[in-house]
Image (spheres, rainbow, N blue to C red):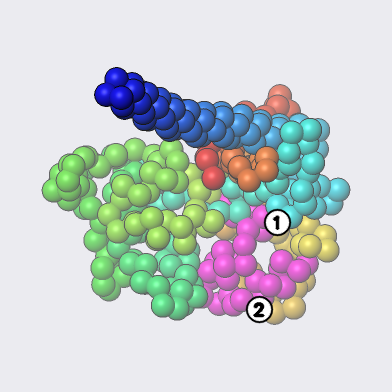
Amino acid sequence: MRANRTRTRREGFIVVVVLCMVIMLSVLLLAFNQESRVNLHAVEDFRKSAQALNCARAGLNIAIAAAESLPDIHFDKSLQSLFSGEKVIALDQGQCLITVSQESGKLNVNLLKEANGKLNRTPIEHLLRLIDALNQDGAGESPIDYSIVPSIMDWIDSDDRVTSLPFVKYKNLGAESNYYSRSSPSYGCRNASIETIEELLAVKGISPEVLERLRDCLTVYGDGKININATSELMLASLSEKMDRALAQVIIERRRFKPFEAVAELRDLPGMTDSLYHAINRMLTVDPTDKYYTVTSRGDVDRLGRTVTAIFRMNEKTKSVEVVLYKEVTL
């Protein structure tokens, strides 16, 4: 009897041990299965992300091919829906959206000062009026400070003298290396031309929020003249104190019907006076010396997206496209 009881206990113990081992193995298998699923999803997401990037790059190549074959891709009617950012272009792996804008429709911040250090009043005053317009439109947002204008000028000029704007009453001082040396971490003033708009984030008074509001109006490329066929209503309305939004909208509606072939055509528009025309005509162009385009192409595969942003220049002599800036963004 005692031997039977001992054998039964041993058998019961073995069963318990076996059950525990089975449970432990099951837990390990479940954990391994879960980890494998996670890894498989990660691999699949990586594959789809790579496909989305390829779609975005394909969109950029479409824009470059169009630029090489057409004189002005931004205003070619056959491409307006393609480059409006509204039409989905189906590709083998997914889809892409392309938007194209001309840098010639923006204000070149590298020209706020002349090479000899003299203040360039025309773009300076344009930028000040642009700040006024943005502040009026930005209800509830912190106002953009006038001092960013001399601060940008100090960032691009070659000297260490703090710039002041004598025609601005308040907040008219810029900043040089002495100001930036007190930052953490400290850094010096560039004292050279800006290479990308994002570089403005290092300038006194320009936060990411301020840059976002200014981004569509500023550039670092071009000869300084504003292309009336490519600029925005806000840029047009801030050309002069005599300009208003209504006349700016008239200009935009006119160019939608037919792009301007000469700046002088502005004189025939309703609301355009001789004094206003003479005040702004030297600031404008319809044929930029250098044609720079910003292309944003977003590729999507299922729920994953990648964006490619590039700035390219049309070389008028060789009729080729030169990519001067390329950036990839994960959505």
Q: Which mark is residue 331?
A: none
Distance between the alpha carbons at the discs numbered 1 and 2? 17 Å
- Residue at 77% over, 62% down: 255
- Sequence-first disc among 1 and 2: 1
> Residue beneath label 1, please?
229
- Residue at 76% over, 69% down: 253
Q: Quadrant of the C terminus?
A: top right
Q: Which mark is residue 246?
A: 2
Magenta segment: does it hold 154?
no
Number of residues whose C-alpha sits closer than 10 Å to that of mark 1, classed few (under 14), some (14–19) or many (20 or more): many
Question: What type is the residue that disc 2 sits on?
Answer: Ala
In the image, residue 249 sits, relative to residue 101, either above or below, namely below
**Residue 75 can be seen in this image:** no
- Residue at 61% over, 42% down: 304
Magenta segment: does it hold 228?
yes
Left or right: residue 88 compared with residue 174: right
Residue range (magenta): 225-254
**Quick one: which residue is furthest to the right in this view?**
78
Frontmost residue, 151 versus 19:
19
Residue 174 appears at what percent x and percent y?
Answer: 25, 56
Q: Quadrant of the N terminus?
A: top left
Residue 182 appears at what percent x and percent y?
Answer: 13, 48
- Quarter-of-image position of residue 207: bottom left
Helix, strand or loop under label 2: helix
Residue 20 appears at what percent x and percent y?
Answer: 37, 30
**Residue 95 can be seen in this image:** yes
